[in-house]
Amino acid sequence: MMSPTTVPTVTLQHRAAMPRLGLGTWPMDDAEAERVIAEAIALGYRLVDTAENYGNERGVGRGLAASGVAREELFVTTKFNKRWHGVALAAEAFERSADRLGLDYVDLLLIHWPNPDQDQYVDAWRGLARLLEQGRVKAIGTSNFKPAHLERIIAETGVVPDVNQIQLNPGVIREEARTFHAEHGIITQSWSPIGGEGVHVLQKGVIVDLAERYGRTPAQIVLRWHMELGLTAVPKSSDPERLAENLDIFDFSLTSEDVAAISGLDEGESAAADSDSFGH
């Protein structure tokens, strides 16, 4: 049996250490999540990303428990929906997620979408700040927030997110958001980092050519690109071989020219889901 891969960590704003690469769990159901998470943790994954909206927190919790790895070695992220956008409501969302996960605390709790038309995300953020103060979560953040949304929560609360998790891959490189995050010490986390539905970055010539040159898979090239840019990422796979491959990216580097060539696949901000109009 090969020894598990050790994933490097990044220290967040509120001092939690988060692995730079983790496992995304959308769209797994409870049964699949339970199986895949136990397998992934055996390979060396320590960050697991779920959400209320995925409907698999119970399975994720069972997989974490089945892994046999100590709780303090694991980093668990979940997210809540717009019905919980309020100070007290965010605490209730946390309680419900923690209960489904079977955990006393969550490492990172995120507001899943800003839902600006509802205009309650600042109160949701106040609720997260309170949970952080109480030690019920180790880190707090946002998902799918644009710089304007982030600017507002920081201005109105004085609390900066640890993480903003956004759709980010070579087809949509989110330069403006990444720059804003870097200026404020917010860690960028990429969801759908190797593409996802309707995004075919793995078939692009530049990726295929680099994969051949480095003797790697196209997915490994793309995930390494995220690492070279200083990002963190949560690729999803339920295939044991691919789970191992996605983790096996810490023993090689891309040149700055390679990184630029991959970034050249960017289709612009319009290729990303618009969080001013979409959310749940």
Image (cartoon, rainbow, N blue to C red):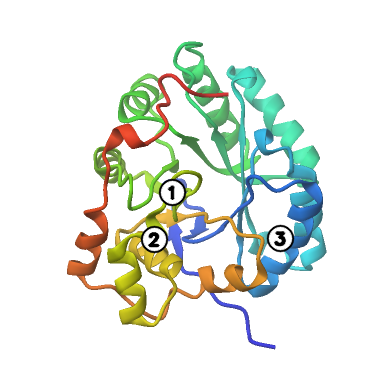
Secondary element at tag 2: helix
Query: Which label's residue is closer to the chain start, 2 or 3?
Result: 3
Residue at x-position 55% and y-position 59%: 22
Name of the residue lying farthest toward the left: 257
| Residue 37 sits in quarter | bottom right
Which residue position holds label 3? Answer: 37
Measuring from the top left, give residue 47's x and y in whole percent.
59, 58
Residue at x-position 62% and y-position 79%: 4
Which residue position holds label 1? Answer: 189
Query: From the image, which quarter does the C terminus lie in?
Result: top right
Secondary element at tag 3: helix
Q: Which of the numbered marks, if any, corresponds to residue 203?
A: 2
Q: Nearer the viewer, mark 2 or mark 3?
A: 2
Q: Nearer the viewer, mark 2 or mark 1?
A: 2
- Check the image and report above or below for 170 versus 224: above
Q: Which of the numbered marks, if any, corresponds to residue 44?
A: none
Asked whether 269 or 159 is in front, the reply is: 269
Q: Amino acid at mark 2?
A: Gln
